[in-house]
Image (cartoon, rainbow, N blue to C red):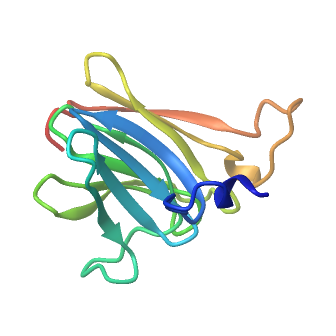
Amino acid sequence: MATRNQVPSSTPFNGGEGIWYHNGIVYFSTKGDNKVWAYETISGVLNIIYNQNSSCTPILSGVNSLTVSPAGDILVAEDGGNLEIVVIGTDGVIAPVVQLVGYNNSEITGPAFSPSFDRLYFSSQRGTKGFFNFWDNDSGITFEIQGPFFNI
């Protein structure tokens, strides 16, 4: 029996991707349906905080890895879409932070802050060539953006 069918009360998700814990909340994304979720660990409440199909500003597609700023703003990287990192603010505002141009057939991966939250790091998985070759140093590339990022 498939694992997903072993627990009757389990909740199936469509293509789990990024996950981050911040102040009692587990944030995660599901790529198959372009949603970002928030699971409140104390109350056990699960909320959808972004749904591309019902959003007033559906600029985020191909949701992938994510991270959270000290203020609670969620940065979500795109795998596909138009290769942006998009912020979902604590006020509900959704806006692009950065876009990679000329990196077709790639995806943005691993957004992470420096310990002092004055730099944001992320990578283009396949760089400008659009493919990954372990022996080719030009396959992927990592970027650094200077902040501060306490409140985005």
Give coordinates of residue 102: x percent, y percent: 61, 59
Q: Is residue 116 left or right of residue 104?
A: left
Residue 144 falls in image quadrant: top left
Looking at the rendered structure, the number of numbered marks drawn on it comes to 0
Give coordinates of residue 49: x percent, y percent: 28, 63
Q: Of residues 109 and 136, which is closer to you in this image?
A: 109
Give coordinates of residue 33: x percent, y percent: 51, 72
Residue drawn 25% across the image and 54% down it: 45
Which residue is farthest left?
91
Residue drawn 56% across the image and 43% down it: 109
Depicted 48 relative to depicted 64: above or below: below
Give coordinates of residue 25: x percent, y percent: 27, 41
Which residue is farthest top?
115
Q: Of residues 82 and 36, which is closer to you in this image?
A: 36
Residue drawn 29% across the image and 54% down it: 87
Q: Is residue 24 left or right of residue 142?
A: left
Q: Quadrant of the C terminus?
A: top left
Q: Is residue 13 left or right of residue 130?
A: left
Q: Quadrant of the N terminus?
A: bottom right
Depicted 129 relative to depicted 135: above or below: below
Which residue is farthest right?
135
Residue 23 falls in image quadrant: top left
Q: Of residues 68 and 14, which is closer to you in this image?
A: 14
Residue drawn 14% across the image and 39% down it: 151
Residue 2 falls in image quadrant: bottom right
Depicted 5 relative to depicted 17: above or below: below
Q: Of residues 133 and 4, which is closer to you in this image?
A: 4
Depicted 135 relative to depicted 36: above or below: above
